[in-house]
Image: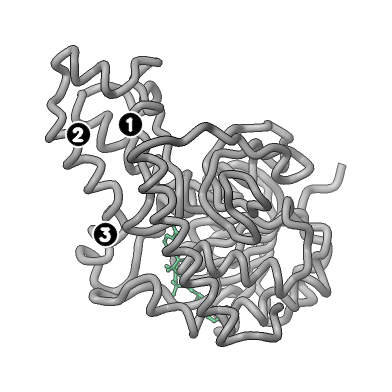
Amino acid sequence: MARDKIALIGSGQIGGTLAHLVGLKELGDVVMFDIAEGVPQGKALDLAQSSPVDGFDCKLTGANSYEAIEGARVVIVTAGVPRKPGMSRDDLLSINLKVMEQVGAGIKKYAPDAFVICITNPLDAMVWALQKASGLPHRKVVGMAGVLDSARFRYFLADEFNVSVEDVTAFVLGGHGDTMVPLVKYSTVAGIPLPDLVKMGWTSQSRLDEIVDRTRNGGAEIVNLLKTGSAFYAPAASAIAMAESYLKDKKRVVPVAAYLNGEYGVKDMYVGVPVVIGDKGVERIVEIELAGKDREAFDKSVAAVQGLVEACKKIAPELL
Ligand code: A3D
């Protein structure tokens, strides 16, 4: 059986980490693409030279033309510019929207059957634009954010309780950014919901609120520390988990930015919700009932995404 081809559009910090993880996990062969000449070629060669040491078989190549992605089964998109300190994800909108138009055209021409995972920010608006520009079916185009946001929440909780990260599950909804909605009642340690853990004295409500807040601002915390860019190890690991679920038809239930057409009362927008990812792409959208404060927070988050999508429609009416 021939190895799957995985195309990485954008060979910067996340792109390089993605390629490394694909190699280490032997998920397939990798084509790294970038507009910067020499960068994808150099990174691919460097990574290929690590393969004898780590003992993985993976063909890694770099390219500056879209033909190289032909026939890819998975395309992961990080092309664009990342945030600098003081910049919001939304400041990136107009620059990265143009990039999504180019990338979408490349995917449409050379990899129309791929499962496409967008990471470029502002995430929920960029994945919307990428789907429009590529014309691929909605179930084959998703955005990575929820896996990362919930991983941050899980890590902070595991650290707070001094338990294994493996035994902490977290549930986040909504757009990627300050309005994301971590649902504490569906987040657990070994199946015990967080509100019960507060009652059991494992932590206090105020401490839990602080952790939720830190999760919401998890990206900015890293941008402020790094000063020259944004997080890349955890974002790459999160996208790889999604790609793996597709490639191996694992049918994992993960939060992703998925196209909603009426679910959760949202139409023609990408918003973070739990979905099942299998070899058909998004195979099911898990629609939970939302009420009270959770509904309010979700609606606020959806409104923020809606604002960005409207801005995209104004800047690039050709996408409609
Ligand atoms: P960076 O290291 O700058 O890599 C981006 C790469 O894109 C660079 O190598 C550029 O040369 C390349 N590029 C720019 N324009 C084009 C183009 N038109 N076609 C092809 N390649 C191009 O950034 P990064 O890897 O750190 O981050 C990539 C993106 O992911 C940014 O938009 C970040 O904001 C975003 N990001 C999202 C999350 C989420 O959770 C959603 C987390 C972290 C970063």
Question: Which residue in the structure is indicated by mark 2?
Answer: 208
Q: Which residue is mark 1?
A: 184
CA–CA distance in space, label 3 to label 1: 23 Å
Q: Amino acid at mark 3?
A: Ile
Q: On screen, 261 above or below 65?
A: above
231 and 211: which one is in front?
211
Q: Quadrant of residue 184?
A: top left
x and y percent of residue 230 in the render? 34, 65
Seen at 75% across and 78% down, the residue is: 105
Q: Residue furthest top?
A: 200
Give amino acid for label 1: Val
**Nearer to us in this view, 31 or 73:** 73
Residues marked 2 and 3 touching at CB (< 8 Å): no
**Residue 67 visible, this orientation:** yes
Q: Is residue 284 left or right of residue 20?
A: right
The residue tagged with tag 1: helix, strand or loop? helix
Which corner quadrant of the image does residue 316 belong to?
bottom right
Percent x, y of residue 5: 75, 56
Q: Foreground residue, 298 or 233?
A: 298
Query: Which percent across, then down, holds residue 172?
Result: 42, 41
Say which residue label 3 marks.
222
Which residue type carries mark 2?
Leu
The answer for how far apart the CA atoms under marks 1 and 2 are is 9 Å
Q: Is residue 276 left or right of residue 158?
A: right
Q: Does residue 52 show up? A: no
Q: Is 229 left, or right, of 209 in this rendering?
A: right
Q: Residues within 10 Å of mark 1 (few under 14, many from 20)?
A: some
- Quadrant for the C terminus, please: bottom right
Considering the numbered disc 3 on the image, is that residue within a helix, a strand or a loop? helix
